[in-house]
Image (cartoon, helix red, strand yellow):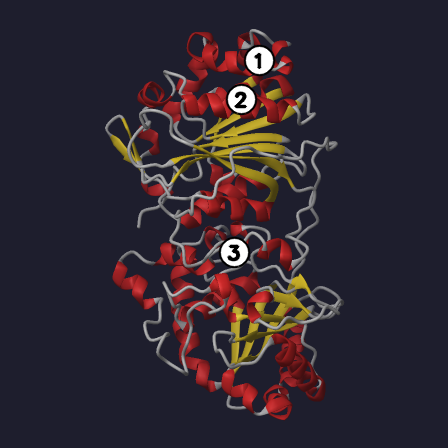
């Protein structure tokens, strides 16, 4: 499947795009402008530095921010569109007067009426893409019909939305527009891609990243073009801290049905936005703390259904060699590292929760902790294997599958067609409540590869909450595995879950699985932006992943 960089963006025809989309002010755009007008006018911001990502031939998002900004930057990848925007900023009144007429109905806009001189002086056009934005540069922003309209891949859609929000300061008001369930579009004589997304998917994902609300705007009259079902408008503020949701309930409450295909919605749409416009003071760029990483993440074992049948004693036997291995790894890291201090090491366990008779978390986790205590090792984190397929509202496995699978035949290699029938190898999604998904079943090697990437922090472009543990210290354990976050922290003084290197202590039974996982990781290393960003990491991530495979584990 093609990606964003495979399309001829430098051939984008801005005149054709304007004539088809903005020459006449449509009812839907009038609705968007009126909603933006009230949102920004009540956001209590002034003299800000704004940004609009990927305007193409659309100046109305910049107009909507104009009264509240000293400067507005238009980030546009296409050279032809950049030239068009610069020319348009010189004489915008003739073609954007109808848009301004809608905006000026609020008195906040009337102080710059007419706005054309201010627009020419304070709006600048800059080359750039949504995938290469700086972090926390602007304090008000818009992005209209970009994330879903620059790629056919859902992975790149998720990254684009996340990168946009990360480019804004904490507490910044923002708005994002989407073409709902778009299948692509033509500009002049060129066809361009789209990623079909629906209301539920957009709302669930954005709710995990920001304080926002997403509304749906119906098509009025003749559709703008074929191949879309309406428009979506998200209004909100970026969060004032960079942390993921503090409790699993925050994520769980916004989950969508994983059985739904991408972009499919149920038609349960709200018609009006209720967005918090409480003033938030923004005093300069707030630098986030550096990401915390351990030097090494040690997977103590991989427990499946068979391992639990022997009880605490059998579990302790499986863990008994872990302390010695951790000591050896610590000494090895100390010799490699010239810095002072002992290496920072965290420990984790991956539970195969796809089996129905593993037992509940409230039963299994205390057994594991007793076994670890008897073996002289501490468990910092516990993860469930189904969390490698989906984390909250983010369908990790399906996003990575898009990147890996160039054909339907290759996609099938990532799935396990026997998952429904096999009593010893069930690696589909969990079977409980809304997380039931009989559409796909993922193979063991694919989930094992994702597990390594989560521990290395390589999937952060999908959102702050992906792979981030939720603190579960002292909290009662749930009855069902799906009620537990994908990764939980069990000790308050635990070293960070994400690490620079990983070590997995595994039974020989998993050797074949990990060999296949290594092949998938090699392919992902050529595909994932996070894995190929640093040219010095020529063999990343394989040079950061190690195993100790023995019959003792």
Tell whether label 2 touches label 1 (CB within 8 Å): yes
Q: Is residue 344 visible?
A: yes
Labels 2 and 3: the sequence-earlier one: 2
In the structure shown, which secondary structural element does the residue marked by tag 3 occupy? loop
Labels 1 and 2: the sequence-earlier one: 2
Vertically, is 512 above or below 288? Answer: below
Q: Is residue 125 visible?
A: no
Labels 1 and 3: the sequence-earlier one: 1
Vertically, is 224 above or below 3? Answer: above
In the structure shown, which secondary structural element does the residue marked by tag 1 occupy? loop
Where residue 339 sits, quadrant-wise, is bottom right
Identify residue for label 1.
105
Task: Look at 53% across and 12% down and name the residue there.
Answer: 120
Q: Residue furthest left?
A: 189
- Residue closest to the eye, 319 or 344: 319
Query: Mark number for residue 459?
Result: 3
Identify residue for label 2.
34
**Number of numbered discs overlaid on the protein picture:** 3
What is the C-alpha distance between the residues marked 1 and 2? 9 Å
Query: Mark number for residue 343?
Result: none
- Residue closest to the eye, 435 or 132: 435
Vertically, is 320 above or below 447? Answer: below
Task: Look at 64% across and 15% down and name the residue there.
Answer: 108
Q: Nearer the viewer, mark 1 or mark 3?
A: 1
What is the C-alpha distance between the residues marked 2 and 3? 37 Å
């Amino acid at each position: 499947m093609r990606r964003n960089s495979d399309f001829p963006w430098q051939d984008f025809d801005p005149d054709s795009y304007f004539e088809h989309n903005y020459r006449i002010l449509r009812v839907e755009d009038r609705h968007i402008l009126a909603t933006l007008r009230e949102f920004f006018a009540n956001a209590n911001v002034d003299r800000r530095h704004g940004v609009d990502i990927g305007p193409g031939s659309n100046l109305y998002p910049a107009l909507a921010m104009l009264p509240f900004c000293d400067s507005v930057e238009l980030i546009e990848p296409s050279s032809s569109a950049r030239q068009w925007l610069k020319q348009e900023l010189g004489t915008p009144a003739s073609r954007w007067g109808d848009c301004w007429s809608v905006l000026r109905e609020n008195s906040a806009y009337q102080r710059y009426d007419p706005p054309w001189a201010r627009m020419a002086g304070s709006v600048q056009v800059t080359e750039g893409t949504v995938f290469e934005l700086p972090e926390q540069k602007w304090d008000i922003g818009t992005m209209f019909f970009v994330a879903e309209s620059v790629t056919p891949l859902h992975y790149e859609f998720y990254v684009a939305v996340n990168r946009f929000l990360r480019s804004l300061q904490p507490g910044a008001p923002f708005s994002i527009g989407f073409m709902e369930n778009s299948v692509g579009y033509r500009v002049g004589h060129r066809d361009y891609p789209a990623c079909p997304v629906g209301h539920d998917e957009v709302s669930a994902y954005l709710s995990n990243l920001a304080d926002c609300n997403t509304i749906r705007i119906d098509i009025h009259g003749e559709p703008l073009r074929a191949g879309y079902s309406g428009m979506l408008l998200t209004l909100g503020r970026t969060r004032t801290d960079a942390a993921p949701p503090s409790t699993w309930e925050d994520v769980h409450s916004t989950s969508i049905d994983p059985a739904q295909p991408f972009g499919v919605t149920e038609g349960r749409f709200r018609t009006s936005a209720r967005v918090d416009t409480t003033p938030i003071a923004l005093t300069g760029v707030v630098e986030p703390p550096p990401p915390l990483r351990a030097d090494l993440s040690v997977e103590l074992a991989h427990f499946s259904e068979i391992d639990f049948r022997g009880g605490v004693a059998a579990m302790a036997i499986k863990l008994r060699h872990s302390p010695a291995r951790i000591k050896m790894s610590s000494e090895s890291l100390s010799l490699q590292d010239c810095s002072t201090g002992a290496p920072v090491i965290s420990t984790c366990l991956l539970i195969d929760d796809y089996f129905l008779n593993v037992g509940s978390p409230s039963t299994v986790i205390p057994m594991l902790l007793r076994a670890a205590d008897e073996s002289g090792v501490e468990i910092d984190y516990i993860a469930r294997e189904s969390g490698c397929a989906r984390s909250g509202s983010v369908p990790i496995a399906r996003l990575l599958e898009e990147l890996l699978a160039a054909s339907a035949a290759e996609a099938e290699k990532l799935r396990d067609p026997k998952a429904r029938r096999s009593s010893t190898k069930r690696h589909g999604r969990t079977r409980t409540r809304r997380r039931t998904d009989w559409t796909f079943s993922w193979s063991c090697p694919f989930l094992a590869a994702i597990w390594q990437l989560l521990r290395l922090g390589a999937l952060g472009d999908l959102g702050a909450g992906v792979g981030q543990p939720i603190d579960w210290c002292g909290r009662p354990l749930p009855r069902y595995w799906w009620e537990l976050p994908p990764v939980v922290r069990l000790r308050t003084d635990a070293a960070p879950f994400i690490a620079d290197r990983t070590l997995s202590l595994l039974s020989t039974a998993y050797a074949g699985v990990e060999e296949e996982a290594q092949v998938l990781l090699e392919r992902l290393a050529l595909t994932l932006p996070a894995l190929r960003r640093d040219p010095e990491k020529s063999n990343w991530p394989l040079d950061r992943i190690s195993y100790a495979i023995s019959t003792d584990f």
